Image (cartoon, grey):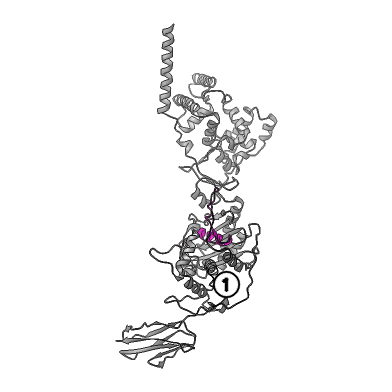
Amino acid sequence: MRRRFAITFLVTVLLAGGAWLLDAFLPPPMARALAVGGEVTDRNGRTLSVLPAPGGVWRLATGVGDVPPHLLAMLIAAEDRRFRHHPGVDPLALARAAGQWVRRGRVVSGGSTLTMQVARMLEPRPRTLAAKAIEALRALQLERRYSKDEILGLWLTLAPQGGNIESVRAGALAWFGRPARQLDMAEAALLVGLARQPTRSRPDRHPEAARRARDAVLLSRAAPAVEQEDAEMARLVAIPTRRQPLPRLAPHLARQLRNGPSTLDAGLQRAVEAILAESLPGLPERASVAIMLAETQPRAVRALAGGAWMAEARAGALDLSAASRSPGSALKPLLYALAFQEGLVTPATLLSDMPRSFGAYAPENFDRGFAGQITVADALRQSLNLPAVALLAQLGPVRFAGLLKEAGFAPRLPTGADPSLPLALGGAGFTLRGMVGLYATLADGGRAAPLALRPGPRAEARQVLEPHAAAQVGAVLVQPFPGGGPAGVAWKTGTSWGGRDAWAMGFDARHVAGVWVGRPDGTPMPGATGARLALPILARVMALVPPAPLAPLRVRAQVAPMAELPDRLRLLFPPPGAVLEEGSDLVIRSAGGRRPLTFLVDGAPLPTEPARRDARWQPPGPGQYRITVLDAEGTAAGATIRIR
C-alpha cells in the first residue's frame, strides 16, 4: 500500500514537474496579442486617430472594460457557457466534439472553449485533431498564467472582424463608427457572430450571412441577461453594409505620439481640419496649410493640423507644422517687445522711416515706399522694415537671438553663421510650433514655457520679458480683421522673401494661434502675402474659441531722444583706394544723408536724379580721380580711386 502510494506520488510529481518545465520552456506565443495598433485620444478620452498594427492589420488592444456587459454575456452564452468554471478545457464539450468526429470522420463542432479559441488566434493552424490537442494544451497554459477577464481581453483583442480588421474595438469603429462600449445589443451580437466566420459573414459583402450570424447569437443561445423580447427587437435592426472610415483626426500628431492621450480637443481639431480643407481651393497650386491652436494657461495645444493630409498633390504626408521656414515680419513683435523692455522706445515714440543702409545691408519696405515720421506703434502695425532693422541695430542681433533662445525657440541659422540684422525681417528658420510658442510668451505676460501635446506635469514658466513690454505689444496689435472676425485679437502677418511663406499669428487673453501657408518644397508663390492667404484662415480659427478680448492701445506721438535714428552719409562704391579697369562704366553708390544728393568727380558734378542715391560715370581714361558725394545739409563723403 505504501509502495503504491509512493509510486503514485512520484509519478504525479514527475508529471507536474514535466508540465511545469514544458510550460516554462514553451510558453504561449503572445506576439500577435502584443502587436496592436496605436490609438491617440483627446483630452477627454475621445479617439482622435488610430494607427494599424504591423502588417496593416487594424487591431486595437481591448479589455472587458472597453465593451458593454451585454456583449460579454452574449459571448459567453454563445461560445462557452461554462467559461467561468473550467480550467481552459471543457471535458463535456470535448466529449461531444469527439463523438461527432467518430461518427462523421471529421471535425464538425470544435468543442472549443473561449480560452482554446484564444490559443488558436495566437497560433493559427489548420482545423485538425492534432491542432485541437495543441489548442487544449495551450489553453491550460493560458489559464495558469492569466485571469478569466484577461483571457476575455485576449479574445476581444484578437477576434477577427472581417478583412484586415481584428479586435472588437476596431470592429465597432469600422462597422458602426463609434466606440465599442457604446454598442447596443444588435451591434454587439453582430461582432460576436462575425468572429465565427469573418469572411463568409462580412457585412459589406454578405449582409444576409451577417444577419444570420447575428440572429444566431441573439436567439439560438441568447445570454440569460438578454430578454427574449429584447432579442426579437434587436433582430429588426438593419445590418451595416458599408465600412466606416476609421478615426483619422490629427494624423501627423498621431504618428508622432503613436499612442496614448493628448491635449487636443476633438471638436476643435475637427473644426480646424475642416477650415484647412475649405481653404485649399483658394490657394496657389501645390500650396498647403498648417494650423496650430493652443491655450496659454496651461500651455496646451488644442488643435494641430500639420498639412493637407487629404491632398497627396500637396505633400499631405509631411508635417509642415514642424518644418523650418522664414517667418518674415511675423518675428517683429518679439523685437519690439525687447525694445520696449530696454527703454529704447515706447509705442508713442516717433521714428524716421526713410532710406538708410546699415553697412552693406540696405533693407526696403515691402511696398518699396517710405512713411517718413511714424510712431513705433504704427511702424509695428504697418510692418515697416527700416524701423525694425534700426531697432535691432541698437539692441544687437545677438541680444535678440538670446531672447528667442531663452524663450525656448532659438532661430535656426546656417551652419557657422552668427545672428545679424536680417533677423529683424525673419532671416532665420522657425517652425509653426516655435512661432506659436513665442506668441504664447507675449500672450502670457512675457512668461515662456514649452507647449504641451500630452497631459501631465507642466514645466515651470520663466519670465523672459517684462510683463509691461509684452502687454504693450499685444495692445498695439489689437486691430480688426480686414475681412471680419472676432474682436479683441492681437494679430500680425509675415511674408518671407519671394512669397515662399505666408504667416498669420494671433492671440487673445486665453488663446494663441498660428497659420502657415506655403509650398512644401519651398518654391516661391508670386504675389503671396500673409495678409492675403493666411490672415483670413487665422480669423476663422480664432472664432472657434470663446471670446477673451484684449484692449487695444491708442497712443499720441511723442519725440524721444533716440527717435530719429540718424543715418550718416556714406559712399558705398567705389571704396577708397580702389583700382578699376579702363573702359568700365561705373555706378557710384551712396547711402544715408539727406536728399537730394550731388555727385562730383574732381569737383565736376555728374548728372543724376534728385531722389536717387547713385550716379553713372564713364572714366575718360587712366589716372587718379577724386569722387565726392554731398547731401542737402552739405555733408560730404568721398574716396580717391585709380583707373588703369
Q: Residue at x 54, y 63 (%)?
A: 465
What's the amino acid at mark 1?
A: Thr
> Residue 619: where, in percent of width, then height?
35, 89
Q: Nearer the viewer, residue 449 or 156?
A: 449
Secondary structure type for disc 1? loop
| Crowd rating for badge 1 (residues with CA inside 10 Å; few <14, some 14–19, many 20+) | many
Instruction: Indicate yes or no whether the magenta region holds residue 452.
Output: yes
Q: Residue furthest bottom?
A: 604
Image quadrant where one finds the N terminus: top left
> Residue 398: where, in percent of width, then height?
45, 67
The tally of labels here is 1
Question: From where the camera sits, is residue 194 visible?
Answer: yes
Question: From where the camera sits, is residue 280 visible?
Answer: no
Residue 39, above or below 94:
below
Could you say which quadrant of the image residue 470 lies in?
A: bottom right
Instruction: Indicate yes or no whether the magenta region holds residue 286.
Output: no
Residue that numbered label 1 is attached to: 346
Region of the chain picked out in magenta, as a range: 430-459
Image quadrant where one finds the C terminus: bottom left
Q: Nearer the viewer, residue 168 or 27?
A: 27
Residue 303, above or below 82:
below
